[in-house]
Amino acid sequence: MRRLWRGLSPAATVYGLLLAWEGVCRAGLVTPFLLPAPSAIAWRLGQQLLAGDLAWHLALSLYRTLVSFALALLIAVPLGLAMGRVRGVRWFCEPLLAVGFPAPKIVFVQVFMLWFGLHELPKIAMATLEGIFPILSATYLGALGVDRSLLWSARNLGTGEVRLLWKVVLPAALPQVLNGAQIALPICFIVVFVTEMLLGGGGLGDAMMLAQRFADSRGVFAGIVTVSLLGYGTMRVVAWTRRLLLHWHVETQVRQL
Amino acid sequence: MAVKIEARGLYKVYPRDKGEAVPALAGLDLQVYENEFLAIVGPSGCGKSTLLYLMAGFLDATAGELLLDGRPIRGPQRDCGIVFQHFALFPWKTVKGNILYGLEERKVPRAERERLARHYIAQMKLTGFENSYPHQLSGGMKQRVAIARTLALDPAVLLMDEPFGALDAQTRRLMQEELLALWERKKKTVVFVTHDVREAVYLADRVAVMTARPGRIKAIVDTRLSAAARRHELLESEELVAKANAVWALVREEVEKSAALGE
């Protein structure tokens, strides 16, 4: 019985909630406009899937998220490593990090619209900017905390100062780098979604805004469900990637027990 | 005997952001002879590790001269291999990967790399663990990997910073015997930092006793044991006990001074 409960419990919460939701709607306690039933939303999702426009919006949002996430990684990881190891870089970047990290960078969206127009660039730039900070901060602290004897060993075995950054500092700081990346990915996702809502140009955010303008609450909820599933899916992929990259780490062994 | 490493009037001061700078070494003179086994003992915080890091080229001296083969030491060099107390293995690399690392960085040809890695894996009794990761190994095994990694580059000087300090007593004893056997087979200059007087006397030809901080050499004691006393099956010999007591008398004075300084 206990084992059955344990196997069910994570999914059971979601199923239970869905059943209750369906019940409330079927009983007519709320109007379908304010809260459409899960079955109605599923029906709509099916229709959108068949029509192909869901796949299109999904692909657009996913494309923007992944490009901005990759750009954020490419900028923040080398910069974070350098901040951890090179005094001049640390001196220059630390105040920027301290001011920039807590600031809500989404306020730049209008400025970015002026600079970059309405198409892909402002959305990707916005999401990249938001994604950089958690990765930069985690990589920097990770690089700063690398054991001195590890660096000295590598120096002793023939590694030069610059090579040290990616031969030793990066792998040693990798658990922290991935922590930052795991925070940055959903942030990129959220920002892409919000900029799509604000600027249009296709994608799940735009599709939901459109559905709202036509008072199509099923469409709005279908969007919410899609975004939630997409977010959950990407996080699973990231967790799996983490285990793959950190197969040498104690953390991975513990989780397998 | 030829001098391998020479320190003349060596000073090392650690700067601090606030308050006074901390002097670690104050005018230290020392000669390490070629192919000898020299142990350095002294109270905690006396600067013995600092001296070793200066020899390895990780730190720069504040003043004075430090020479390897008559040339000043500037930065890490191939001739000086180091082994740390906490192994400092690359946790993302396997046993074999760790041993290969230095050979790859020094651009040793592939076939030669493989041969050397196999040789040291066998010599350090690591066969069967080639593909294990450091966190899967015991402390003694980790230190064997670290020693193999350093020896693979065949340095003329082996610097050891309390290499057996983190091991249990039995493993430590076996590792000491193995290190001696290794050194007897293939002579190298060994500088061995420890706070264990018995270990120093058991292993070394000479033991350098350092003063309380700031460190200088207080005395150098000849501790070469007879072959009988070094026979591995003996736990303690009278000769070893007598020499260890003599060294301990010197160290004790400094430990007491160090304690009086509130350290």
Image: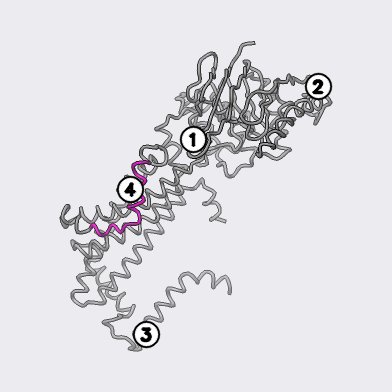
Q: Label 1 is placed on what type of residue?
A: Leu
Q: Indicate left or right for A14 with A226 as reference.
A: right
- The image quadrant that residue B158 belongs to is top right
Judged by depth in the image, the label closer to the viewer, 4 or 2, is 4
Q: Which residue does the numbered mark 2 point to in the structure image?
A: B228
Where disc 3 sits, the SS reads helix
Q: How is the image coloured?
A: one colour
Q: Residue at x 32, y 49 (%)?
A: A72
Quadrant of res A60 = bottom left
Residue depth check, mark 1 versus mark 3: number of the one nearer the observer: 1
- The picture places residue B102, in percent across and down from the top left corner, at 50, 29
Which residue type does callout 4 highlight?
Answer: Leu
Mark yes or no: residue B69 visible.
yes
Bounds of the magenta span? A91-108
Q: Are marks 4 and 3 in contact (CB under 8 Å)?
A: no
Q: Position of residue A26 (x, y in %)?
A: 34, 86
Which mark, residue A151?
Answer: 1
Residue A96, labelled with which disc? Answer: 4
- Image: B104 above or below A236: above
- Neighbor class of circle 3 (other Cα within 10 Å; few <14, some 14-19, many 20+) is some
Left or right of residue B63, residue A22 in this image: left
Say which residue appears at 66% left-offset and 18% top-offset. Answer: B36
* Callout 1 and callout 2 share a chain: no
Q: Residue at x 53, y 39 (%)?
A: B94
Q: What's the distance in space between the residues labelled 1 and 2, CA to CA?
A: 41 Å
Q: Determine the CA span between mark 2 and mark 3.
A: 91 Å
The type of residue carrying mark 3 is Val
Q: Is residue A65 above or below residue B83?
A: below
Which residue lies at the image location 55% right of the left edge and 51% below the top edge?
Answer: A253
Q: Mark 1 and mark 3: span between their CA atoms?
A: 62 Å
Residue B173 bears which disc, if any? none
